[in-house]
Image: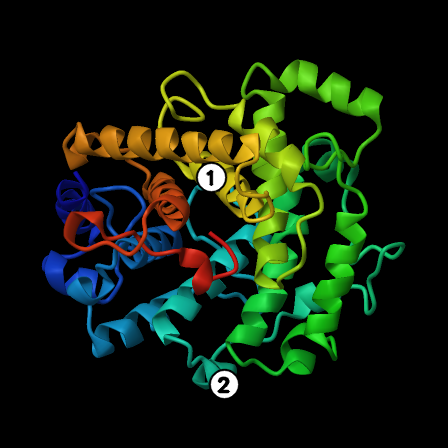
């Protein structure tokens, strides 16, 4: 089943390569997020990059010269304010776009991003927003009331800004010049101290707004998404960062049942696989490392991971690549969901049993 999906991915990617020579365009990362477009866009370039990295197929798409061209393409979307802008009609926040772009640069640089210091622009607008010394009682930056009420949205800022800080460190960028802070590791610890002290102990998620405002918002929002699912999707953006800085998970015993119960009867967390499946598997899998072997939560966690992994793999394997989601941004999160389950369920393996790659070994964001 995995071999079939990996083969289909190649054709899915080529369908989004822009130009008269799709193979050459693909090697340079010139992808659009939708097929049959006239020019590449940032999300197309990044979505296919992340997906290829997760599947272990990046070297099949490109080479050293192609990586350099792919890097040039990503850098072309950075504005003078320091933010990356998607350049298409997708309504993603600059925090998400920038965190995602820096993750792409981490993948392409293969651990040696120092050369990017002369090519990336300092994150000027970001610098104006970061507190110098965040901590338990000192917020790292402002969050609007809407960001607090609609935390799935707000978490792209709450986690995205921290992801940018961590990515800049891993790329070897001078922190004072690019971030405006002296000790980014200490800043990240202070960021986590602030947010970790505000977790809902019953779920492991966040509830930052007053109860009445959340109740009113949820009454309307449930027409689009399940509010608890949205709370889970928001929480994971912060746990991506806390895991990268090796901060202990405060309430793992709450995260597993709260998350697993959100799975639908299909084994997916919504109608089709996308990043919400990654979100759930990340929380369940990472929380599992804190659970004593033999505890009933261990079996519950492993069962949830196995069920979702099978559902995601079956969804992709059961249809031609033309029937996968047209927008490529749904793809890397769905594939990463399998990789997160593989972390727990697959021990090494070979051939079709080879686990897909944990993207968070390289990036701070997806």
In the rendered view, does 206 fall on the left or right side of 89?
right
Label 1 neighbourhood size at 10 Å, few (<14), some (14-19), many (20+)?
many
Residue 343 location (% of width, % of height): 40, 50
Please tell me which residue is depicted at 24% across the width and 50% down the height of the picture: 38
In the rendered view, does 326 fall on the left or right side of 145?
left
Residue 122 vs 274, above or below: the answer is below
As drawn, the label of residue 118 is 2
Mark whose residue sits in front, 1 or 2: 1
Please tell me which residue is depicted at 62% across the width and 70% down the height of the picture: 123
Residue 118 vs 207, above or below: the answer is below
Residue 210 vs 171, above or below: the answer is above
Q: CA distance from mark 1 to mark 2?
A: 38 Å
Residue 98 location (% of width, % of height): 53, 59
Q: Quadrant of residue 242?
A: bottom right
Please tell me which residue is depicted at 39% across the width and 36% down the height of the picture: 274
For marks 1 and 2, the one nearer the N-term is 2
Q: Nearer the viewer, residue 164 or 317?
A: 317
Residue 340 location (% of width, % of height): 41, 46
Q: Quadrant of residue 207?
A: top right
Is residue 152 visible in this depiction of the protein? no
In the rendered view, does 208 fall on the left or right side of 68?
right
Q: Quadrant of the N terminus?
A: top left
SS under mark 1 = helix
Q: Nearer the viewer, residue 50 or 347?
A: 347
Residue 95 location (% of width, % of height): 59, 54
Residue 130 vs 224, above or below: the answer is below
Please tell me which residue is depicted at 62% across the width and 62% down the height of the picture: 246
Label 2 neighbourhood size at 10 Å, few (<14), some (14-19), many (20+)?
few
SS under mark 2 = helix
Q: Residue furthest front?
A: 294
Q: Nearer the viewer, residue 35 or 139?
A: 139
> Where is mark 1, residue-wise?
281
């Amino acid at each position: 089943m995995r071999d079939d999906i990996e083969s289909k991915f190649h054709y899915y990617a080529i369908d989004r390569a822009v130009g008269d020579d799709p193979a050459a365009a693909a090697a340079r990362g010139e992808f659009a997020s939708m097929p049959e477009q006239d020019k590449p866009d940032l999300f197309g370039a990044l979505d296919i990059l992340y997906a290829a990295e997760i599947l272990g197929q990046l070297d099949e798409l490109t080479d050293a010269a192609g990586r350099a061209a792919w890097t040039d393409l990503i850098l072309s979307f950075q504005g003078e304010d320091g933010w990356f802008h998607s350049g298409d009609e997708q309504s993603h926040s600059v925090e998400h776009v920038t965190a995602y772009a820096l993750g792409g640069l981490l993948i392409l640089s293969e651990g040696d991003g120092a050369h990017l210091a002369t090519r990336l622009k300092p994150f000027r607008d970001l610098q104006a927003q970061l507190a110098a010394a965040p901590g338990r009682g000192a917020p790292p930056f402002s969050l609007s009331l809407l960001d607090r009420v609609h935390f799935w949205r707000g978490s792209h800022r709450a986690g995205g800004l921290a992801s940018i800080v961590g990515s800049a460190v891993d790329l070897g960028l001078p922190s004072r010049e690019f971030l405006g802070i002296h000790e980014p590791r200490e800043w990240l610890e202070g960021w986590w101290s602030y947010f970790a002290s505000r977790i809902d102990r019953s779920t492991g998620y966040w509830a930052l707004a007053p109860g009445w405002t959340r109740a009113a918002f949820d009454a309307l929002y449930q027409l689009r998404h399940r509010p608890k699912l949205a709370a889970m999707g928001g929480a994971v953006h912060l746990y991506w960062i806390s895991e990268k800085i090796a901060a202990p998970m405060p309430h793992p015993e709450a995260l597993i049942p709260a998350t697993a119960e959100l799975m639908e009867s299909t084994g997916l967390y919504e109608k089709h696989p996308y990043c919400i499946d990654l979100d759930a598997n990340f929380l369940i899998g990472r929380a599992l490392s804190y659970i004593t072997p033999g505890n009933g939560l261990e079996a519950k966690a492993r069962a949830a991971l196995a069920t979702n992994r099978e559902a995601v793999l079956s969804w992709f394997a059961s249809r031609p690549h033309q029937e996968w989601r047209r927008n490529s941004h749904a793809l890397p999160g769905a594939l990463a969901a399998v990789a997160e389950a593989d972390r727990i369920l697959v021990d090494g393996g070979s051939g079709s049993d080879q686990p897909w790659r944990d993207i968070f070994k390289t990036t701070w964001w997806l």
